Image (tube, coloured by chain):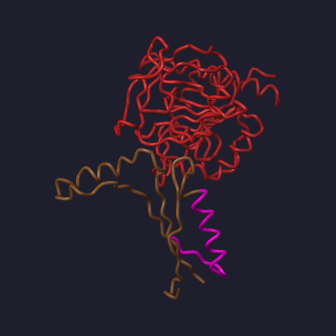
């Protein structure tokens, strides 16, 4: 093992908006940000992959649908199968759902309005690359900004998600009480983020990359990126 | 030979359809108070080069399943097909 910081790749799709912020968040938290390109078949040997927010391919067809079949998704799928940590934020979450890496789908907010505000999330599990340094019940404050963030799933998926503890974050108030007005988009069971069965792939609608700098807002994204970097560092050590 | 297909993608029953609702809500003011059950879906037209219709239809089915629709929230139907020169 060396002292080299963990390398976290951030994929830029045509229409990505938050790739720069994600790279900056990685660097702010002490990692090395590595830009990745949607049309390449190359993850450049990174220790973790982030799919950022935005409107990939104009969100034509459905949010994330076309990006879910982008060339680099083959490599992301192989990386995920090998246990590599993968984080999808907002449009990145939609892409992971469309690619079949996460259960469920995101549809238009129940209010039919774009929502842009800080929300509180209750952590439901520590068994993910972005919550390993948090404990269940803990609350983090992070902004949302989306028009299509209402999480839905088939009845079979709901049974699996709840039965296997795949919910990672739920919308809550500052005291960790879930539901009601705290839910900004009408998501099923107040779900803000889910993971896959293996626990190494996570998606969430809120934006932790916009919440690492105390000068510009809440800092609830810090423990998520700290967890991701710790997980990535462990992986870098294991594969070195 | 070129075969033309149309794929209709619709939201699964029970899912909120804001576009359908908005269209429906605008109708009474136009004098159509008797219209209800409005749903908006997506129509996709495709030309497929293939040696026979069955091969082309199987490809369209796969395209519709893997890309044009999301099985969590949508259903699809392959509406009709014809050869590009108009012969059925």
Q: Position of residue A121 (x, y in %)?
A: 50, 21
Q: Residue at x 75, y 34 (%)?
A: A83
Q: Residue at x 34, y 37 (%)?
A: A113
Q: Residue at x 39, y 48 (%)?
A: B17
Please, is residue A223 above or below residue A147 in the view? above
As drawn, is A54 to the left or to the right of A45?
Answer: left
Q: Position of residue A179 (x, y in %)?
A: 45, 22
Q: Tell me the quarter of the image containing the C terminus of chain A.
A: top right
The residue nearer to you, when weighing B27 against A194, is: B27
Q: Which chain is red?
A: A
The residue nearer to you, when weighing B74 against B56, is: B74
Q: Residue A31 occupies which quadrant of the picture?
A: top right
Q: Tell me the quarter of the image containing the N terminus of chain A.
A: top right
As drawn, is B44 to the left or to the right of B37?
Answer: right
How many circles with numbers are drawn on the protein? 0
Q: Residue at x 56, y 50 (%)?
A: A67
Please, is residue B60 above or below residue B33 in the view? below
The residue nearer to you, when weighing A61 against B40, is: B40
Q: Residue A11 occupies which quadrant of the picture?
A: top right
Question: Which span is picked out in magenta?
Answer: B46-66
In terms of secondary structure, what is the magenta stretch mainly?
A: helix
The residue nearer to you, when weighing A84 against B45, is: B45
Q: Position of residue B7 (x, y in %)?
A: 50, 66
User: Is residue A222 shown in magenta?
Assistant: no
As drawn, is A165 to the left or to the right of A188?
Answer: right
In this view, which residue lies farthest toward the top? Answer: A175
Please, is residue B5 above or below residue A24 in the view? below
Q: Position of residue A52 (x, y in %)?
A: 54, 37
In this view, which residue lies farthest toward the front? Answer: B34
Q: Which chain is brown?
A: B
User: Is residue B53 shown in magenta?
Assistant: yes
């Amino acid at each position: 093992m060396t002292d080299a910081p963990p390398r976290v790749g951030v994929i830029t799709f045509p229409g990505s908006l938050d790739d720069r912020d994600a790279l900056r968040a990685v660097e702010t938290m002490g990692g090395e940000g590595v830009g990745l390109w949607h049309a390449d078949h190359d993850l450049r040997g990174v220790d973790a992959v982030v799919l950022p927010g935005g409107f990939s391919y104009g969100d034509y067809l459905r949010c994330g649908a076309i990006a879910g079949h982008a060339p680099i998704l083959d490599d992301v799928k192989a990386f995920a199968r090998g246990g590599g940590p993968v984080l999808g934020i907002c449009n990145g979450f939609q892409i992971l759902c469309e690619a079949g890496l996460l259960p469920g789908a995101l549809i238009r907010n129940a209010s039919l309005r774009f929502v842009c505000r800080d929300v509180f999330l209750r952590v439901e599990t520590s068994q993910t690359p972005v919550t390993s340094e948090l404990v269940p019940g803990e609350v983090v404050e992070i902004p949302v900004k989306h028009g299509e963030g209402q999480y839905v799933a088939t009845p079979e998926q709901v049974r699996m998600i709840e039965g296997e503890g795949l919910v990672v974050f739920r919308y809550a108030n500052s005291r960790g009480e879930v539901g009601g007005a705290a839910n900004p988009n009408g998501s099923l069971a107040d779900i803000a983020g889910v993971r896959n069965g293996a626990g190494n792939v996570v998606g969430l609608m809120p934006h932790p990359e916009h919440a690492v700098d105390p000068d510009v807002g809440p800092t609830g994204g810090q423990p998520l990126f700290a967890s991701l970097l710790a997980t990535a560092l462990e992986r870098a050590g294991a594969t070195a | 030979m070129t075969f033309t297909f149309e794929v209709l993608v619709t939201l699964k029953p029970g899912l909120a359809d804001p576009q359908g609702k908005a269209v429906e809500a605008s109708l009474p003011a136009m004098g159509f108070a008797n219209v209800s059950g409005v749903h908006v879906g997506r129509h996709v037209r495709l030309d497929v080069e293939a040696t026979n219709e069955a091969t082309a239809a199987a490809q369209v089915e796969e395209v519709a399943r893997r890309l044009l629709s999301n099985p969590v929230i949508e259903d699809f139907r392959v509406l009709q097909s014809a050869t590009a020169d108009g012969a059925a």
